[in-house]
C-alpha cells in the first residue's frame, strides 16, 4: 500500500533512522517521521511520497512511548541542532548501538555482528567545546530542515559560559551598531559567532565578518576578557565581488592559541584546528583506539586523517616512529608545532590527501606495522585502503563518525584477510544521532 500525500494515517514508530527520524510503516511502506520516538503510536499527515518511502509529520500522539520525555530545551521543537532530545538517554544509547550494528550487518555483510561495548556519556548536556551561532537578521541556529534562523540566547549542548559570551557579543553589536549579515541582499557585517573552549574553561571567539575590521573593537575585547576569553579572531570574508570562496583568520585580541592537554601531551588549538568536541568522551575514545593499536617500541605507525596529531603524538612515545597524514595544511602546521612543543622527534607529518600520499609512502618502503585511521564522514577510499592492504599491517584501528561508511570500508578489509577483533560504540554527541565507533582489525594468519 502506497500512502497518499495529504492523507492522515495511524502508525507505530518501530525504529529510528540515522538522521534521527522515527520510522513507521503503512502496510510495508516506510514512513519517516521527524521527532517520532520508538514505541509511539501517532497520527501522521503524509507530506511527501517517494518511490520507496514517505515523509510525514505528527498530527497527534495517540499513545506515548515510555521512552518519550519532555525536551528540556525550549527551542527543541524548531532548532535543528538536536534530533532526539525528546528521547530518554538510555533509549538514545540503545538506538545508536542498533544503528551501528545494523549498518555493519546490512552494508558490511558481517553476520551476527554486535558491539563488544558501548560507552555512554556521563554528561549528556553542556559537553560541546565548539559551537557556531549564525547571523541573518537575527542570531541563532538553523531551523530543522531549513536555513531559517531560530533566534536563541544559548545552547544546552554548549559548554557552560558560552551563553554569557554570546550575550556579550550581541550586546556589543547592538551598542556599537554592528549589523547582522543579510543573506538576501548581502549587507551587514556580522555573519557567524564561533566559540570554542578548552577543558579548563578558557575560550576563543571567532567572529565571521563581512569587513576588514569591526567598529569599537576595544569595547568588545574588554567585555569578553571578563568572561575568560583568551583570544578573539576575525574571520574575514575576502571574496568581495569575485565570488570565489576565500577567508582569512586575523588575530584581533589575545593569544594565538588555546592550550589543551590529553594523556600528558600538550596541544595548541587554533581556529582551524580539528579537535573532538567532547573532551571527556574523546579521552575514552582515544584510550580505546590506542589500546587496540597496542603499539610496541619496535612498531612503525601510520596515523591517517590525523588532524593536529592528537593520536599520533599520544602513541609516539611507545613507537619506533609515527607518520601522520592530513589534508588540511594548517592542521599539519599545528601537529608539527605540537610535536616540537612536547619534544617528540620520532613523528613526521605530511600535508596531503591520504589517497595521494599513502600509496607513494608505502610503495617507497614506508610500510607501517600499525595503521590508525580517523576519516571524515565520507569515510576513506579504495585507493588508500588498497595501499594499506598492500602494506599488510598487523593491526588496523578504524575510528569512525559514520556507521554507513565505516561498514563499507570494513568490508574491503574483511574481504582481504582481516578480521574484527573488537568494536566499540562511543556516545560523543548526546541528544543528536551522531555516534562514534572504534574498530580493531587484525590480519589473519594464513
Image (tube, helix red, strand yellow):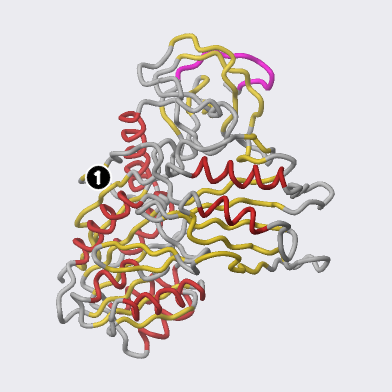
Q: Give the residue drawn at x 33%, y 37%.
A: 98
Q: Secondary structure at mark 1?
A: loop
Whole-percent x, y for residue 322 in the image:
29, 79
Q: Give the residue drawn at x 51%, y 73%.
A: 330
Whole-percent x, y for residue 354 in the image:
45, 74
Q: Quadrant of the C terminus?
A: bottom left
> Measured along the vertical axis of the image, is residue 33 above or below residue 368?
above
> Measured along the vertical axis of the image, is residue 109 above or below residue 140?
below
Which region of the structure is painted magenta? 3-12
Can residue 135 be seen from the camera position used here? Answer: yes
Whole-percent x, y for residue 187 in the image:
82, 52
> Measured along the vertical axis of the image, is residue 181 above or below residue 316?
above
Q: Depth check: 413 or 219 in front?
A: 219
Q: Depth check: 327 or 404 in front?
A: 327
**Which residue occupies the extreme top position in the image?**
62
User: Magenta stretch containing residue 140, yes or no?
Assistant: no
Q: Give the residue drawn at x 22%, y 44%.
A: 117
Residue at which label 1 appears: 115
Residue 328 is left or right of residue 3, and the answer is left
Whole-percent x, y for residue 356 in the image:
49, 79
Q: Give the residue drawn at x 15%, y 70%.
A: 445
**Which residue occupies the extreme bottom position in the image?**
364
For mark 1, does the 10 Å Cα neighbourhood hold few (<14), some (14 to 19), or many (20 or more) residues? some
User: Magenta stretch containing residue 7, yes or no?
Assistant: yes
Q: Depth check: 163 or 3 in front?
A: 163
Q: Give the quarter of the image for residue 430.
A: top left
> Measured along the vertical axis of the image, is residue 313 above or below residue 285?
below
Can residue 305 be seen from the camera position used here? Answer: no
Amino acid at each position: 500500500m502506497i500512502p497518499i500525500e495529504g492523507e492522515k494515517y495511524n502508525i507505530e514508530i518501530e525504529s529510528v533512522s540515522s538522521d534521527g527520524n522515527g520510522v513507521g510503516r503503512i502496510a510495508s511502506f516506510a514512513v519517516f517521521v521527524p521527532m517520532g520516538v520508538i514505541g509511539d503510536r501517532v497520527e501522521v499527515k503524509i507530506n511527501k511520497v517517494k518511490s520507496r518511502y514517505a515523509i510525514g509529520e505528527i498530527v497527534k500522539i495517540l499513545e506515548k512511548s515510555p521512552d518519550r520525555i519532555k525536551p528540556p530545551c525550549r527551542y527543541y521543537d524548531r532548532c535543528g541542532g538536536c534530533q532526539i532530545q525528546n528521547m530518554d538517554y538510555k533509549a538514545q544509547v540503545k538506538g545508536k548501538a542498533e544503528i551501528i550494528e545494523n549498518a555493519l550487518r546490512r552494508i558490511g555483510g558481517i553476520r551476527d555482528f554486535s558491539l563488544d561495548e558501548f560507552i555512554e556519556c556521563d554528561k549528556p548536556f553542556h559537553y560541546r567545546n565548539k559551537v557556531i551561532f549564525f547571523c541573518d537578521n537575527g542570531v541563532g541556529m538553523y531551523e530543522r530542515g531549513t536555513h531559517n534562523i531560530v533566534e536563541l540566547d544559548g545552547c544546552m549542548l554548549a559548554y557552560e559560559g558560552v551563553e554569557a559570551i554570546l550575550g556579550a557579543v550581541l550586546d556589543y553589536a547592538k551598542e556599537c551598531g554592528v549589523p547582522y549579515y543579510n543573506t538576501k541582499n548581502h549587507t551587514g557585517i556580522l555573519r557567524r559567532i564561533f566559540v570554542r573552549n578548552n577543558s579548563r574553561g578558557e575560550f576563543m571567539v571567532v567572529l565571521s565578518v563581512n569587513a576588514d575590521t569591526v567598529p569599537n573593537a576595544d569595547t568588545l575585547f574588554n567585555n569578553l576578557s571578563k568572561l575568560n576569553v583568551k583570544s578573539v579572531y576575525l574571520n574575514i570574508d575576502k571574496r568581495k565581488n569575485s565570488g570565489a570562496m576565500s577567508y582569512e583568520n586575523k588575530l584581533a585580541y589575545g593569544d594565538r592559541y588555546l592550550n589543551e592537554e590529553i594523556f600528558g601531551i600538550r596541544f595548541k588549538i587554533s581556529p582551524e584546528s580539528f579537535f573532538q568536541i567532547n573532551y571527556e568522551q574523546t579521552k575514552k575514545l582515544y584510550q580505546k583506539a590506542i589500546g587496540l593499536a597496542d603499539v610496541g617500541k619496535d612498531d612503525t605507525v601510520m596515523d591517517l586523517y590525523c588532524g593536529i596529531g592528537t593520536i599520533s603524538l599520544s602513541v609516539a612515545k611507545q613507537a619506533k616512529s609515527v607518520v601522520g597524514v592530513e589534508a588540511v595544511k594548517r592542521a599539519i602546521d599545528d601537529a608539527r608545532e605540537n610535536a616540537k612543543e612536547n619534544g617528540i622527534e620520532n613523528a613526521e607529518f605530511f600535508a596531503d590527501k591520504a589517497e595521494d600520499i599513502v600509496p607513494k609512502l608505502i610503495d617507497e618502503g614506508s610500510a607501517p606495522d600499525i595503521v590508525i585511521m580517523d576519516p571524515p564522514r565520507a569515510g576513506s577510499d579504495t585507493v588508500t585502503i588498497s595501499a594499506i592492504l598492500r602494506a599488510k599491517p598487523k593491526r588496523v584501528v578504524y575510528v569512525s563518525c559514520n556507521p554507513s561508511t565505516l561498514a563499507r570500508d570494513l568490508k574491503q578489509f574483511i574481504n582481504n584477510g582481516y578480521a574484527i577483533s573488537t568494536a566499540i560504540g562511543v556516545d560523543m554527541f548526546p541528544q543528536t544521532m551522531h555516534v562514534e565507533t572504534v574498530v580493531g582489525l587484525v590480519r589473519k594468519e594464513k
